[in-house]
Amino acid sequence: MNTESSAGDADARARDAVQALYAGDAASKRLGIEILEVAPGRVRIAMIVRPDMVNGHGICHGGLLFTLADSAFAFACNSHGIAMVAAGAAIEFLAPAPQGERLIADAVETFRTDRHGIYDIAISNSGGEQFAHFRGRCARLRLPGPPAGRPPSSPQDVP
């Protein structure tokens, strides 16, 4: 198999994994988040700051900036097709994001194993002005197993 074909297959698998996660993500959809680009470990998404997203200062609420970054983080860390969830995250607010601004969140994988990973997310606009920087740490999702002494009843019961 050639490298170009292999990379294309990996990109297609990443897009499929992200689309499947997005399909069930009511929060991201409600916020108007759109997926722009997907590759294994990398995602670019966007959201427009609507009037109902501003705080008392007339700028985008910090919790919504966190949510945008967290969505990019979730899509990027699940782009390999293995269920991962946030284990920790931090954000630095760098500049106020005004109403009407189209925010772009770029998520990049900086470290990953089968069990956990670290991702950096930059939130900026199309002109490159940066509004926030987010770092997330993910861990593999392991659903609880069956009670002791009982065989698994479904694939979800198997950790």
Image: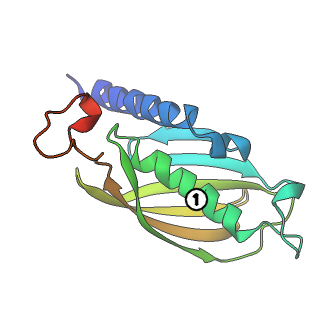
Which one is in front, 141 or 98?
141
In x, y percent, where is residue 144? 27, 47
**What secondary structure is marked by label 1?**
helix
The reply to whether residue 129 is in sight is yes
In x, y percent, where is residue 20? 48, 30
Q: Is residue 110 above or below residue 19?
A: below
Q: How crowded is mark 1: few (under 14 residues within 10 Å), some or many (20 or more)?
A: many
In the image, farthest residue toward the left = 149
Q: How is the image coloured?
A: rainbow
In x, y percent, where is residue 47? 72, 49
Q: Quadrant of residue 152?
A: top left
Tell me the quarter of the image containing the C terminus. Answer: top left
Mark 1 sits on what residue? 69
Q: Residue at x 68, y 66 (%)?
A: 63
Q: Which residue is drawn at 25% across and 28% down?
A: 154
Tally of numbered tags: 1
Q: In this view, does 31 lie above or below 12?
A: below
Q: Residue at x 52, y 31 (%)?
A: 19
Q: Which residue is drawn at 58% across and 59% down?
A: 69
The reply to whether residue 34 is in sight is no
Q: In this view, does 6 lie above or below 61?
A: above
- Left or right of residue 2, residue 129 in this image: right
Which one is in front, 158 or 153?
153
Tell me the quarter of the image containing the N terminus. Answer: top left
Three-letter code for the amino acid on which mark 1 is drawn: Ala
In x, y percent, where is residue 17? 43, 33
